[in-house]
Amino acid sequence: MIFPLSPDLFFTSPNNEDTLYYDTQVKLSWENKKNKNVKLLFSIDRGKTWNLLGRDLSVNEILWNVPKFQSDKIMLRLVTIDNEDVELIRKIENAHSNEIRCLDISEDGKYLLSSSRDSKIKIWSLAKNEVVDSLTFFTSENFFNAYFYNNHIVATLDSTLLLWNRESGKAEVAKNLINNAIRSCAVNQKEKVIAAGSFDGRILIIKDDFQGSVSSMILPDSAIVYSLTFSNKGDILAATTYSGHIYLIDWKKEQINYVYSGHGDGENQNLLVWDCNFSKNDDYLISCGVDKTVRYWDLLNHKQTQNIALHNSHVRAVDFHKRFDIGLSASLDSSLMQTDKTDGTLIGSKIKADGQIITALYSETGDTIFSAGRDNAIYLWKNKINKIDTDEISCFLIEYTEPKQDESEFVISPNPFSDFAEIKFYLKEAMDYTINLVDLSGKSIYNKYFNNEKSGVQIITINLWDISSGYYTLCINGNNFSKCKSCLIVK
C-alpha cells in the first residue's frame, strides 16, 4: 500500500518506482515543512515488517549503502509525529483503600469504573471528579476485573462472575458458573455476550445477561486464563495464559483459530502473559508479560513483529490507541510508555507515576490516559498527539553490473582541436604504448612513449600547441595493439 503524499513530508529522492542497486550508495532526501524530527524506515517484505534506518533525524537527507537483500523490491517510509509531552491532569488520591486492579471507560466517555482489592467497585463522574455510584462486598473476596456492560457492570469476584444492575441496585452472581473458579472476564456489548476465563484453562461464553445458555471450551494447556479481550469487530476472543500462550478464539464456533507464543526468558521461565489488546483494525495485537516485555503481533501474517524490552519490571497492562498505530504499556516499575507498532520505538518520554501500575487504558479519542495501581490512586494524563505525517515510496532492487565496455572504442575529443585533445581507448591488458602523429606525407610530427600498468579504459590528454593546422593521422601502438584515427588541427 502506497500512502498518499503528505503536503508537509515527502521524499524528493529517490522517486517512487526508481531502481536502486545492491552494494551501492544512494542519497535519500525529503522535504520536511514542519521541521519535526523524522523517522526513516525500510521494508523488504512489501510492508509486512519495517526496519529502522534512522530516527530523530533533523537533517533532510542521508547517504545509505544499500545492503544485499534477498528481495527485488524495497519500500521506504518517512514518519513525523506532532505530539506534546504527556502531562498529569488529575490525581485522585486514596481512590480505594487497597490496590486498584482494573479501570474501564463508559461508552459515552463520561464515567470511569475502578475495581479494587478492597472489594469495592466505584463509578466516577469525570466531569465532577466524584464517585456517583459504588458496590461493596463485605467479604474477603477481591475484584480482579470489572467492566461496563450495557446498563450493568460485569465483574470477576475471585471465584465467580457478578452482574450488577445499576438501575435496580441488584448484584447477581452467575449460579451456573458455580463450579468454575473464574479469574478473568470480557464483555461484547454488541452481541450481548460475556466471556469468562477460569483458573483451570476453561473459557466460558455467557449470553443474554446470565439468562441464556453457557458454552465452554478448555484450552489445550489448561493454564490459568489471566486476561480476555474481544476484538473490535467482536468476532474473535483473545485469551492470555500462565503458560505464555495467546489464543485467538472464534467464540461462535468454539474453536481456536491461532496460538501465539514467545513471551518468557527461555527455559520455560516467566511465561505468564498478563494482558493483550487489539489494534483499531483488528490486524495487530499488543501483549505484555512477566518477562518485562511488550510485543506486537501481526494477525494477518501470524508472526511477532516487535519485542520491546524498555520496562524494568512486570508489564501488567496494554492498550491500543483508537486513532493511531500506537500502543500503551503499564508496568510495576511505575512507568507508562507509548510505542510505535511499526518499529517498536518509544514515542515521547516515559511517564512516571508514584506507585506500581497495574492497569491503564486510553480514552476513546486517545487524548487521555487513565492509570492506577498499588498506590491506591487514579491518574488522568493529558496525551496530545496532534498529527502523524507519513510518506512512502517503493523502489526496485537489482544487482549493479558494470556496463559492457566497447573494446573497439577510440575517441579523440574534441575533433577538430587547437592545442589540447583528450584521447580515450581500451586495452585488454596492461602494456606500454606510443602515440604517434603523422601528416599527410607520412612524416611523424609528434611521438611520445607512455609507461602504463593498468588495463581497461585509458584516458590521456596531449598538448599539440606547436603543431601547425592541417589533417593528421593519430596512431596508438603497443604490444600486438594498434589503432589509428584521423584528426584536424585548427589554429
Image (cartoon, rainbow, N blue to C red):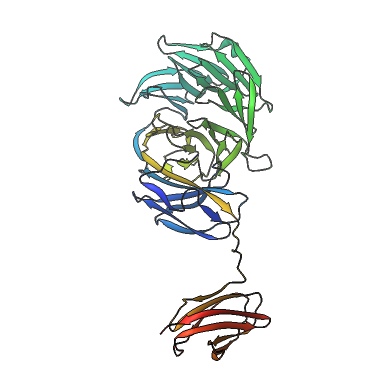
Q: Is residue 239 left or right of residue 27?
A: right
- How many numbered marks does the figure carry? 0
Residue 384 picture quarter: top left
Q: Is residue 119 visible?
A: no
- In the rendered image, residue 215, in percent from the top left (x then y), is placed at 62, 14
Quadrant containing the C terminus in the rendered view:
bottom left
- In the rendered image, residue 174, in percent from the top left (x then y), is placed at 55, 12
- In the rendered image, residue 226, in percent from the top left (x then y), is placed at 58, 28
209 to 42, vertically: above or below: above
68 to 308, vertically: above or below: below
Q: Is residue 401 left or right of residue 9?
A: right
Q: Nearer the viewer, residue 242 or 245?
A: 245
Q: Is residue 198 visible?
A: yes
- Image point 50% across, 80% down: which residue? 487
410 to 239, vertically: above or below: below
165 to 125, vertically: above or below: above
Q: Nearer the viewer, residue 58 or 98?
A: 58
Which residue reaches farthest left?
A: 128
- In the rendered image, residue 347, in percent from the top left (x then y), is placed at 43, 44
- Image point 66% across, 43% down: which residue? 266
